Image (cartoon, rainbow, N blue to C red):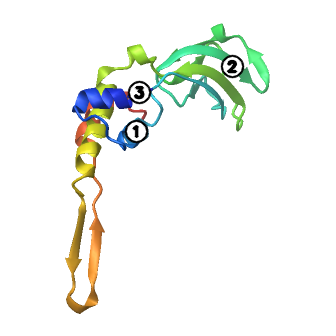
Amino acid sequence: MLITVQDLEKYSGVRGDALASNYVTSAIEIVRNYLGYNPEQTEYDELYDGTGMDVVFLDCPHITELLEVEIGGESVPVDNFYVKENALYYKGGTFPLQMQYVRVHYVGGWPEEAMPESIKGTALQIASLRQVESGQNIGVSSKSFGNEGTRVFLSTRKYNDLLFNISAYKLI
């Protein structure tokens, strides 16, 4: 897991918060959405459209192991390919220009012990901010309009200033 409740407690110094797992889960989701992929080491088995070129772009930029490639249902030895970031290159071949024609089975992301500290730290900062802000109703305001009643306005916190620290890992 990218971060845990125990990581948050150690980072923030707040113990016994019943909602801590919610803050951790939402922070992880914010980081994943920003990056465009799950940074945790995960096994993928996905279908891609053929490009008519020697490259197909995968959904995870940190590929650690290429397990299997099929083109049109036929297995092709993995040593016929190489990976650079999220690009799968076919040495001496092309991926036929057809929809859902290339199946790639691979492992992507970082194992827990090798997770970049900036990614983990950003998730912890976001979870901690959510924890601190939750009890103070930050982002909630209301306005009275005389006899017409009251309106409540919600403002969501943007974490762009924190997420910028991990922009180098973002899938473009």
Residue 14: give x, y in percent of width and height: 24, 35
Q: CA distance from mark 1 to mark 2?
A: 38 Å
Residues 154 and 64: in front is 154
Q: Which mark is residue 69?
A: 2
Q: Identify the residue under disc 3.
A: 2
Residue 72: give x, y in percent of width and height: 77, 27
Q: Amino acid at mark 1?
A: Ser
Tell us which disc is closer to us: 1 or 2: 1
Q: Can residue 39 be seen?
A: yes
Q: Amino acid at mark 2?
A: Val
Q: CA distance from mark 1 to mark 3?
A: 13 Å
Mark 1 residue crowding within 10 angstroms, few (<14) / some (14–19) / many (20+): some
Residue at the limit of the structure toward the top, as seen here: 79
Asked whether the residues under the numbered discs 2 and 3 touch, taking CB atoms below 8 Å apart as contact, a structural biologist would say: no
Q: Secondary structure at mark 2?
A: strand
Q: Identify the residue under disc 1.
A: 21
Residues 88 and 33: in front is 33
Q: Earlier in the sequence, mark 1 or mark 2?
A: 1
**Quadrant that contains the N terminus:** top left
